[in-house]
Amino acid sequence: MKLRFIVPLVYILFLMLPIYWLVAMSFKTTNEILAGFSLFPQTFTLDAYKTIFTDPTWYWGYINSIIYVSLNTVISVAVALPAAYAFSRYRFLGDKQLFFWLLTNRMAPAAVFALPFFQLYSAVGIFDTHLAVALAHCLFNIPLAVWILEGFMGGVPKELDETAYVDGYSFPRFFVSIFIPTIKAGVGVAAFFCFMFSWVELLLAKTLTAVEAKPIAATMTKTASSAGYELGLLAAAGTLTIIPGAIVIYFVRNYIAKGFAMGRV
């Protein structure tokens, strides 16, 4: 009986160990990190966090990342909602093939699109903007959001639509005031996955920005110097990157399992 509790506990501790180690390193100096193994900081310091919160280059990296990730999440969900509704409610030539093709976009590595996006955005004048990164991430996030939302919409009876039309609702009014609230859990899960995929994507974010919209991932390369890496500062920056994801997970924690199954459980 005890084994049922010990095994999950050991597994959770194993998963949490890298996070704990990252947080502990953020309160150490680089010399202490390199000096040897220690479970707890021997010389507790907040210098790394002070640097991040007082240096504009550092905190603007976080602000830039949050801006383009939030923008991408809004665009992806807004575009995916009507598309998912069409796949859920209507049948047309090639619908199943198109629906499957959407997901194949997730199978292509971001590196394949880095150069085309760079040249295209430079030509139209949106290189090094938050919009450039947000639109680039839509290539991957919109198909994912469509798949998730279609699963949730498939669980809503079509009689709901018919009843609303009989009651005199126009489609926009029905869609916004009745249908979307019915699948609000799915919207939350889709937004969560869009947020997380955009937040952790590094290659396109670094390729499509230079100064004005530089993300925190690019800023973290500043920790390299002639003396080596500032490991404490790098650990503090990494610790802070976990917080936005943790906040988003908290709000959709009750629906994440269903989201992993694309709404089909």
Image (cartoon, helix red, strand yellow):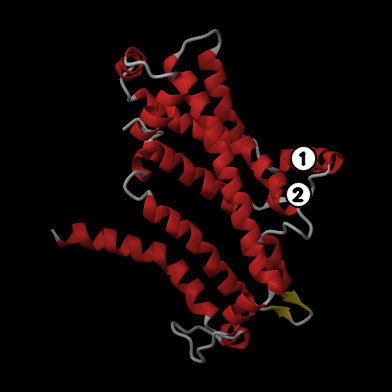
Q: Residue at x 53, y 31 (%)?
A: 80
Disc 1 marks which residue? 117
Disc ID at residue 61: none
Disc 2, SS:
loop
Disc 1, SS:
helix
Q: Residue at x 34, y 61 (%)?
A: 12
Image quadrant where residue 233 sits: bottom right
Residue farthest to the top, as pictured? 93
Q: Position of residue 96 (x, y in %)?
A: 50, 16
Residue count near mark 2 (Cα–Cα under 10 Å), binned few <14, some 14–19, many ≥20: many
Disc 2 marks which residue? 208
Q: Which sits in the foreground, 216 or 126? A: 126
Query: From where the camera sits, is residue 109 visible?
Result: yes
Q: Position of residue 201 (x, y in %)?
A: 62, 50
- Image position of 36 with respect to 140: above or below: below
Query: From where the camera sits, is residue 152 visible?
Result: no
Q: Are marks 2 and 1 in contact (CB under 8 Å)?
A: yes
Image quadrant where residue 142 sits: top right
